[in-house]
Image (tube, rainbow, N blue to C red):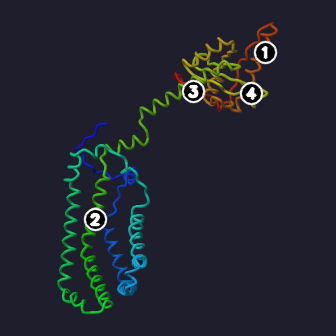
C-alpha cells in the first residue's frame, strides 16, 4: 500500500486508532505528574507522622546505644538486637511504602485505565539496529526529555542549596541539642525544604502535562489516506467481499444442482425460469423449493430433470411467482398452494401412467396465480 509520506496529518483520530494506541501502551499520562504525586505524598507523610517517626527513631537510638559487656560476649543477642532495630525502622517507614505504592498505581489507572501490554516484551531485531538507536537518541522527543531533566536538576539543586545556605547556622546548632530536639528540628528543616522543592517543580509538571497532551494528539492525528485505509480494513476490501459473495453463490448453486435429482417436478417458464419442487406428504407440511434459477441455470436444471426422468411442466406465471416469492429450502407461499396442488396432481397421474400405462395425462392449463403474487419476471443469468 503506497502512502504519500509528505501528506500532512490533519484529520482527527478515529476511535479505532485511539484503541490501537492504548493497546500498544501509548497514553497521555505525564510521568512528571506521577513524580510530583510521589514527592507530595512523601512530604505529607513526613509532616503527618513526624512525631511518631521522631519518637520511634529516638527509641531505636536509645536502645542501640545502651549496652554492656555481656552484649559484646553474646553475638547472638547482638544479631537479634540488630534485626529488632531493622524491624522497628521498617514499621516506622511502613506508611511511606504503602502510600508510595498507592500513588504509583492508582493515578496511572485513573488517568490511563488498566491495560496489560506485553508488546514491549516481544523480541524485535529492529531494536538492535544501531542506526535506529542513534535516530531515537537524537530525536526531538529525547531532546525535550533531556532538557526537562537538566531543568529539574537545576531547580532542585538551586532551591536545596539556597535553603541549606540560609539555614546552615541552624543546622550546625543541632549538634548542641539533645537527640530528640535534633531529630524534631531536623525533620522540620527537611519538610520545609521538600515543600519548596515541590513548589519549584510545579511549573515543570504543568509544562509536561501540556506537552504530553500536545504530543499524544499529534501522534494520533491521521492523514486522509490513513482514514480511507482504516475504513477499508474495518469494512473489508470490496474486491475480497465480492469474491466471497461469488464463492458463496457458486457453492449454493452446486448444492442446489446436486438436489435437483430429488425433485418431484420442474416448473418452467419454459426457457428463462426453472423451479424444482419436492413434496413428501408424510414428512412435509407443504411443497418445498429445492432449486431455482434463470437463464443458463434454468436450462441446466431442465437438462438434469430430463436426465433423471423428472416431470417438467410449463407454467410461466407460476414459475415466475415461485422464483420471486420463495426461497431455496423453504416451503412455498400459502397463496400458491392451490396452483401447485394442480401441478402435483398431474405429477402423480404421470407416475401412475408410468406404472400402468394407458393414455398420457393431460397437462393442466390456465393455472391461476393470485394477483398479489403475479411477477412479470427478469431475465438474468444468476441463481
The answer to the question of whether label 2 and label 4 lie on touching residues, with beta carbons closer than 8 A, is no
**Front residue (pair 207, 349):** 207
The residue located at (69%, 31%) in the rendering is 331
Q: Is residue 91 visible?
A: no
Count all numbered tags in the image, as a single digit. 4
Q: Is residue 238 above or below residue 381?
A: below
The residue located at (63%, 20%) in the rendering is 316
Label 3 packing within 10 angstroms: few (<14), some (14-19), many (20+)? some
Label 4 packing within 10 angstroms: few (<14), some (14-19), many (20+)? some
Give me the disc on residue 210.
2
Report, in whole angstroms, how far the alpha carbon at label 2 lies from the one at label 1.
89 Å
Q: Percent from the top left, x then y, of residue 321? A: 63, 27
Mark 3 or mark 2: whose residue is earlier in sequence: 2
Look at the numbered disc 4 and give the secondary structure of its residue.
helix
Report, in whole angstroms, how far the alpha carbon at label 1 lies from the one at label 3.
32 Å
Q: Is residue 206 left or right of residue 330?
A: left
Residue hosting label 1: 349
Residue hosting label 4: 338
Q: Nearer the viewer, mark 2 or mark 1?
A: 2
Q: Percent from the top left, x then y, of residue 49? A: 39, 83
Report, in whole angstroms, how far the alpha carbon at label 4 lies from the one at label 1.
17 Å
Look at the numbered disc 3 and give the secondary structure of its residue.
helix
Look at the numbered disc 1 and give the secondary structure of its residue.
helix
Report, in whole angstroms, how far the alpha carbon at label 4 lies from the one at label 3.
29 Å
Q: Is residue 172 above or below residue 155?
A: below
Amino acid at each position: 500500500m503506497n502512502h504519500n509520506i509528505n501528506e500532512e496529518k490533519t484529520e482527527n483520530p478515529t476511535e479505532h486508532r485511539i484503541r490501537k494506541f492504548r493497546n500498544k501502551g501509548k497514553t497521555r499520562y505525564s510521568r512528571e505528574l506521577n513524580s510530583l504525586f510521589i514527592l507530595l505524598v512523601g512530604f505529607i507523610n513526613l509532616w503527618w507522622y513526624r512525631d511518631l517517626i521522631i519518637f520511634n527513631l529516638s527509641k531505636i537510638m536509645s536502645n542501640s546505644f545502651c549496652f554492656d559487656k555481656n552484649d559484646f560476649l553474646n553475638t547472638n543477642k547482638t544479631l537479634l538486637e540488630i534485626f529488632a532495630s531493622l524491624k522497628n525502622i521498617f514499621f516506622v517507614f511502613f506508611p511511606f511504602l504503602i502510600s508510595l505504592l498507592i500513588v504509583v498505581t492508582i493515578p496511572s489507572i485513573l488517568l490511563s485505565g488498566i491495560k496489560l501490554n506485553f508488546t514491549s516484551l516481544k523480541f524485535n531485531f529492529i531494536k538492535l539496529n544501531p542506526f535506529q538507536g542513534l535516530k531515537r537518541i537524537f530525536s526531538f522527543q529525547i531532546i525535550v526529555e533531556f532538557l526537562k531533566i537538566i531543568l529539574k536538576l537545576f531547580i532542585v539543586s538551586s532551591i536545596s542549596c539556597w535553603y541549606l545556605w540560609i539555614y546552615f547556622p541552624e543546622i550546625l546548632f543541632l549538634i548542641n541539642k539533645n537527640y530528640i530536639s535534633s531529630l524534631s528540628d531536623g525533620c522540620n528543616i527537611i519538610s520545609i525544604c521538600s515543600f519548596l522543592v515541590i513548589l519549584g517543580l510545579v511549573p515543570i509538571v504543568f509544562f509536561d502535562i501540556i506537552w504530553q497532551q500536545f504530543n499524544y494528539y499529534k501522534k494520533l492525528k491521521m492523514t486522509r489516506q490513513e482514514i480511507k485505509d482504516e475504513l477499508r480494513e474495518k469494512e473489508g476490501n470490496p474486491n475480497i467481499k465480492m469474491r466471497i459473495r461469488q464463492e458463496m453463490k457458486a457453492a449454493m448453486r452446486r448444492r442446489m444442482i446436486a438436489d435437483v435429482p430429488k425433485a418431484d417436478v420442474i416448473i418452467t417458464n419454459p426457457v428463462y425460469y426453472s423451479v424444482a419442487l419436492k413434496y413428501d406428504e408424510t414428512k412435509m407440511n407443504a411443497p418445498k423449493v429445492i432449486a431455482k434459477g434463470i437463464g443458463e441455470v434454468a436450462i441446466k436444471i431442465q437438462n438434469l430433470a430430463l436426465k433423471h426422468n423428472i416431470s417438467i411442466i410449463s407454467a410461466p406465471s407460476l414459475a415466475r411467482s415461485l422464483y420471486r416469492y420463495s426461497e431455496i429450502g423453504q416451503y412455498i407461499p400459502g397463496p400458491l398452494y392451490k396452483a401447485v396442488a394442480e401441478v402435483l396432481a398431474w405429477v402423480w397421474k404421470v407416475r401412475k401412467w408410468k406404472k400402468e400405462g394407458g393414455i398420457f395425462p393431460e397437462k393442466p392449463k390456465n393455472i391461476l396465480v393470485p394477483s398479489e403474487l403475479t411477477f412479470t419476471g427478469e431475465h438474468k443469468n444468476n441463481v
